[in-house]
Image (tube, rainbow, N blue to C red):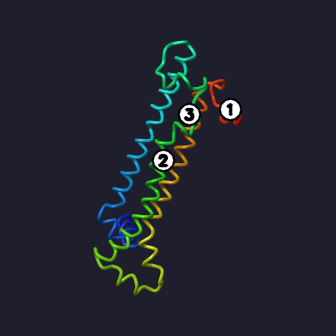
Amino acid sequence: MSENQKEKKWKRYFLPWLYESGLPQILLLVLLFLVLISLSFFISYNREYTMLLARLAGESVPPKYSSLPLQMKPFWTMAYWTLLPILYYAVACLLGGIPLSYASCRHASRADYTLKRLGSKWEYHRRCLFLPIAMAVVSLLTFVMLTVLYYIFYLHLTPAELLPYAAYRFM
């Protein structure tokens, strides 16, 4: 079987009306955009660390930072707004993607008639649910990988005496 035939078989089996529309590429680009937004964690970390070092050196800092304890903020308070959109995206892929997938199958090529006549009664549902569930799983895996990666950077870059107690006891 040649590569071209394998590609045709793949496209024919898994949601042909969605693959021809370019929807998976759009969904992956949105996920990439959210990953790029999550890189702002490093900006937040740098700001907090710089202000903490300025306070330790006795320099003047904005009032927002002067009343905080002399330790880094906990990890999740810095990573909250940078990583949370990826979780929201996973939920949006499920809640919005499933009805969109069924509607696309029903209205684009009327493939629902063909799929309902196949031997397996679950084939229609399997094809309609594949892309939204796959994108939600990819989003959740991306969230977990980025959280672990950012937490490793947080523990590695912050001196042990400046870590909050909850982070320090795991070292």
Q: Is residue 75 above or below residue 145?
A: above
Quadrant placement of the N terminus: bottom left
Specify whether 109 is left or right of 158: left
Give the x, y percent position of residue 65: 51, 24
Answer with the quarter of the image where residue 147 lies. top right
In the displayed image of the protein, which residue is found farthest to the top?
58
Q: Amino acid at mark 3?
A: Phe
Residue underneath mark 2: 84
- The three-letter amino acid code for the residue at tag 2 is Leu
Label 1 Cα crowd, 10 Å radius (few <14 / some 14-19 / many 20+): few
**Which disc is residue 165 wearing?**
1
Nearer to us of marks 1 and 3 is 1
Q: Position of residue 78 (x, y in %)?
A: 52, 36
Whole-angstrom CA distance, mark 2 to mark 3, is 18 Å
Choose the circle earlier in sequence order: 1 or 3. Answer: 3
Q: Is residue 99 left or right of residue 142?
A: left
Q: Are marks 1 and 3 in contact (CB under 8 Å)?
A: no
Helix, strand or loop status at disc 3: helix
Q: Quadrant of the C terminus?
A: top right
Which residue matches tag 3?
153
- Between circles 2 and 3, the one closer to the viewer is 2
Give the Cα distance between marks 2 and 1: 24 Å
Taking the image as shown, residue 27 lies to the left or right of residue 87, namely left
Q: Amino acid at mark 1?
A: Tyr
Q: For the point 43% across and 36% down, which residue is it? A: 40
Which numbered disc flags the more N-terminal residue, 2 or 1? 2
